[in-house]
Amino acid sequence: MHGWVIVDKPKGATSTQVVGTIKRVFDAQKAGHAGTLDPMATGVLAIALGEATKTVPYAMAAEKTYRFTARWGEARDSDDAEGNITATSEHRPTKAEIEAALPSFTGTLHQVPPSYSAIKLAGERAYDLARDGEDVVLAPRPVEVVAASLLAIPDPDYAEFEIRCGKGTYVRAWVRDLALALGTVGHVSELRRTRSGGFCAQDAIALETLKGFMHIPAAFEHLRPISTALDGIPALAVTGPDAVRLRSGHPILIRATQFAKITEGQPPGNDLQGLTVFLSTGEGEPVALAQFAQGELRPFRVFNFGTR
């Protein structure tokens, strides 16, 4: 059982619980997801099964899109609606103030993750330490917010946003910091991931629907190819003998026609050393992920379909 399942995660479930359910639905031995969603969040949770787990790092590194609601006037220890109130403010920012602040909250930001996060401190999850009442201090880390827009202001207490961001960005921290910059405090009251790399909400299936397909063929209609997570990585078909060598962990020499296909779309003069290439057979069966080096394609992730 190999491929990707795009789940529309319901509110209240943890990402780990959803992965466990999908493993049972598909009777899969290996599974992993491409980026945690908090229990209160909904939306796109991409889950890899079997050999597709070898492509999880590429899906995790992909750009993500979130739509969410900020609640002004209340700071919470978790930076979302599930936490305890730690501070309040009477100030409510105007539309003009919010829009004027947004440019400072795009680009490369140095963000302090929420105390209630899965980051490890001395081997312990930060959220476990925070729940035990310990003072959790996390170091700021660079994150990339590609774009941010104000969608609506339903009333003075709430504002709705959309952001596109890179790996490791915490929406809860973004709202916390924006509120402080606007002279108030705030937290996330609603959060939905609408896109994760090439996976989008329109293609996601509800978890309850998948539960109804437990161990029956209808579930397989929602299994997507391994290559789905590799958008933007050059793809190349290889012959039978080359596929055998690659699956054995051996490099193959690159031919002029193959080199032309790899370089197609690459910037002029781009150094291809170390470039990752997705290799499949002429029938589209995944073979390996390889790197271009000194005229060879050297496999570093081989797809093995001999076992589940």
Image (cartoon, rainbow, N blue to C red):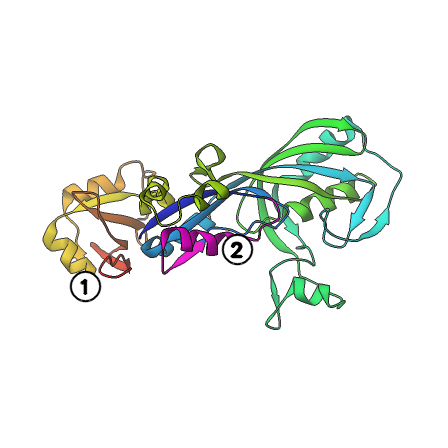
Q: Nearer the viewer, residue 211 or 38?
A: 211
User: Is residue 20 part of the magenta span, yes or no?
Assistant: yes
Residue span colored magenta: 11-32
Crowding at mark 1 (Cα within 10 Å: few <14, some 14-19, many 20+): few
Which residue occupies 57% across, 53% down? 14
Quarter of the figure with residue 296? bottom left
Quarter of the figure with residue 140? bottom right
Does residue 75 appear in the picture of this structure? yes
Query: Which labelled disc corresponds to residue 248?
Result: 1
Q: Which quarter shows the C terminus?
A: bottom left
Give the percent coordinates (x, y) of residue 111: 66, 51
User: Is residue 165 part of the magenta span, yes or no?
Assistant: no
Considering every residue shown, the one lying at the far bottom of the view is 122
Disc 2, SS: helix
Give the percent coordinates (x, y) of residue 148: 62, 34
Q: Nearer the viewer, residue 140 or 195?
A: 195
Which residue occupies 34% across, 56% down? 50
Q: Nearer the viewer, residue 209 or 190?
A: 209
Looking at the image, residue 30 sits to the left or right of residue 128; the answer is: left
Give the percent coordinates (x, y) of residue 261: 22, 39
Looking at the image, residue 70 sits to the left or right of residue 34; the answer is: right
Q: Amino acid at mark 2?
A: Gln
Q: CA distance from mark 1 to mark 2?
A: 36 Å
Front tag of 1 and 2: 2
Query: Which labelled disc corresponds to residue 45?
Result: none
Does residue 294 appear in the picture of this structure? no
* Residue where numbered disc 2 is placed: 17
Looking at the image, residue 5 sits to the left or right of residue 162; the answer is: left
